[in-house]
C-alpha cells in the first residue's frame, strides 16, 4: 500500500475493524518511511458468474434457481433441505474457485448431478431425466444402467 504522503510502498497495519455490517474492513496504517498514519478500506470484490444457457443467452447465476430444481428432484424423498443447501453452496464455491466468469448450464447441471448422486439416487435419476432430456425409454435405461454399474463396481 503506497503512502499518500511520501509514496513509500511499505506500511504496517496498526488497527483493523469491520465496518458496514462486515462488508468492508477499515485498516489504520503507518508508513514505514515517514511514520504518518492513514486509513484504507478493503471490500470483497464479488464478480458475478454468468450462465450460458442452451439457447446461448446469458444470465447471472442464481443459487436459488439451482436449489429449486434440486428440491423438485427430491420431491417426496427424505432429503433434508440443509443437505441440498450445502450442495448448492459447494457448487457455487466450485464455480467461484474455477476463476471462469462464464459457465455453461451443462457444467452446472453436471455438478448438480454429481451432488445428487451422493445424496439420493432417485433424485439423481429424476434430475438427470429432466436435465439430459431423455428422448425415450432406452436413453433413460442407459442412465440407470450406468448408475447400477457404478454401484456394483464399488463407487
Image (spheres, rainbow, N blue to C red):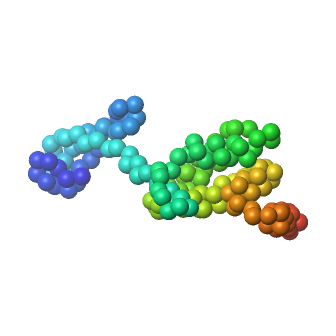
**What percent of the width, then of the height, locates residue 31?**
19, 48
Q: Which quadrant of the view contains residue 86?
A: top right
**What percent of the width, then of the height, locates residue 84?**
68, 44
Residue at the far right in the pictured view: 152
- Is 13 situated left or right of 144 in this image? left
**What percent of the width, then of the height, locates residue 74?**
75, 44
Q: Which quadrant of the view contains residue 54?
A: bottom right
Depth check, front residue: 87 or 124: 124
**Tag count:** 0
Residue at the far left in the pictured view: 6
Quadrant assignment for the C terminus: bottom right
- Is 93 situated left or right of 79 in this image? left
Depth check, front residue: 9 or 126: 126
Residue 133 appears in the rendering: yes
Residue drawn at point x = 53 percent, y = 61 percent: 55
Residue drawn at point x = 81 percent, y = 51 percent: 122
**Does residue 103 sit above or below 20 in this rendering?**
below
**What percent of the width, then of the height, locates residue 56?**
50, 62
Residue 147 appears in the rendering: no
Residue drawn at point x = 38 percent, y = 46 percent: 44
- Is 126 situated left or right of 15 in this image? right
Residue drawn at point x = 48 percent, y = 58 percent: 57
Residue at the far top in the pictured view: 21
Q: Which quadrant of the view contains residue 149?
A: bottom right
**Does residue 99 sit above or below 67 in this rendering?**
below
Amino acid at each position: 500500500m503506497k503512502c499518500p504522503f511520501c509514496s513509500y510502498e511499505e506500511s504496517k497495519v496498526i488497527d483493523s475493524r469491520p465496518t458496514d455490517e462486515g462488508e468492508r474492513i477499515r485498516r489504520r496504517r503507518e508508513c514505514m518511511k515517514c511514520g504518518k498514519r492513514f486509513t484504507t478500506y478493503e471490500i470483497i470484490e464479488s464478480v458475478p458468474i454468468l450462465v450460458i444457457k442452451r439457447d446461448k443467452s446469458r444470465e447471472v447465476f442464481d443459487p436459488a434457481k439451482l436449489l429449486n430444481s434440486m428440491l423438485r428432484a427430491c420431491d417426496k424423498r427424505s432429503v433434508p433441505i440443509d443437505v441440498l443447501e450445502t450442495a448448492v453452496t459447494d457448487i457455487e464455491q466450485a464455480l467461484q474457485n474455477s476463476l471462469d466468469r462464464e459457465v455453461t448450464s451443462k457444467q452446472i447441471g453436471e455438478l448438480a448431478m454429481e451432488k445428487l448422486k451422493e445424496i439420493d439416487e432417485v433424485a439423481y435419476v429424476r434430475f438427470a431425466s429432466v436435465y439430459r432430456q431423455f428422448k425415450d425409454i432406452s436413453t433413460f435405461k442407459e442412465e440407470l444402467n450406468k448408475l447400477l454399474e457404478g454401484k456394483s463396481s464399488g463407487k
